[in-house]
Image: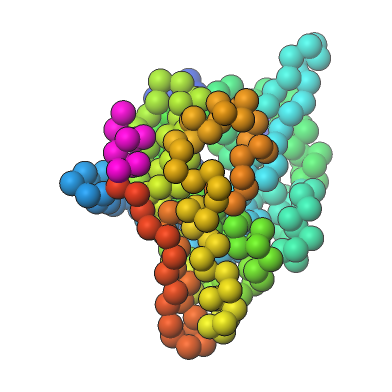
Amino acid sequence: HRLDGGALVVDAGVGVPGSFEAGRLFAEVCLGGLGEVTFCDLGFGRVVLPGVTVSVSRPAWACMAAQYAGWAVDIPVGDGRKRYFAMVSGPARALYRGEALFNDLDYADQAGVAVLALETRKLPPAEVAAWVAAKCGVEPSGVQLVVAPTASLAGSVQIAARVVETGLHKMHELGYDLAAVQAGIGTCPLAPVAADDLTAIGRTNDAVLYGGRAWYTVDSDDATIEAIVEQLPSSASRDYGTPFGELFKRYDGDFYKIDPMLFSPAEVALTSSRSGRTFLAGAVDDAMIAQTLLA
């Protein structure tokens, strides 16, 4: 779709069914071209599920400066009585740099094109593109937006593809220097498409929290790794062990009431490029995956 002003909108699952391939490309857009997403089979006990493998170079830039959904669009549209809301990922976050996170990343982009991925069930009107253009310092004709809802084929894929990003975000929350992370690779099962976005939020989060695995190569000594690795998997959280949909209801639909230490892969491995040793923490939960993804 071309909006007034020339912005491009790519519908990956709002007015069309979308596809797994659309989700794979959506995820690679989120990573700003610094990651590769492929499909795979993953075993959980006697159950084999489709999944994704995500490999990332320059993880701090790819995952935190681009893929992380740290920005949101929430503006009045039309006559001002309605609002448009979407969670925002993608490389144009590094043009905007309005998130406090960028104070720690020491990274900025300069470009005449602003590419973002929106997680929402509504295609954006021209006002959204104009708002993004102003925030990113580009012309509206330079705005490119890819859109898919959570409960869609593309939504399931692009959220599973955040498995490396979630571990990296937790490292940042724990004070680890993300510049030391040299590479990341991870796997995560694909949540079956849900009937509604609320159910999809639960399933897609459970896929990462109970079925996600991530491996990182880091430029750190063994002592630094040992001090942090046990805190990295989702099992280190007080909220671990309850399906995410139930947690969401328990906390009245408020993400911010959920323990932030929950949001990470089930299993995390750190390999020191100095010593060559690998430190592993956490484990996938076969029973929980069967309970939440196959219900």
| For residue 214, side relative to residue 117 (left or right) | left
- The residue under the point 30% across, 43% down is 287
Tell me, yes or no, whether the highlighted magenta stretch contains residue 249.
no
| Badge count | 0
Instruction: Please identify the quadrant where the N terminus is shown.
Output: top right
Instruction: Please identify the quadrant where the C terminus is shown.
Output: top left
Q: Depth check: give the residue in front, 69 or 213.
A: 213
Tell me, yes or no, whether the highlighted magenta stretch contains residue 293.
yes
- The residue under the point 49% across, 30% down is 246
State whether the magenta stretch is mostly helix, strand or loop: helix
**Span highlighted in magenta in the image:** 287-295
Give the percent coordinates (x, y) of residue 163: 47, 52
Give the percent coordinates (x, y) of residue 233: 49, 58
Q: Where is 13 relative to 280, above or below? A: above
- The residue under the point 55% across, 62% down is 231
* Quadrant in the rendering for residue 65: bottom right
Q: Depth check: give the residue in front, 148 or 105.
A: 105
Q: Where is 196 relative to 140, above or below? A: above
Q: Residue furthest left?
A: 46
Q: Depth check: give the residue in front, 61 or 251.
A: 251
* Quadrant in the rendering for residue 108: bottom right
| For residue 147, side relative to residue 107 (left or right) | left
Give the percent coordinates (x, y) of residue 119: 57, 33
- The residue under the point 66% across, 71% down is 177
Q: Is residue 41 visible?
A: no
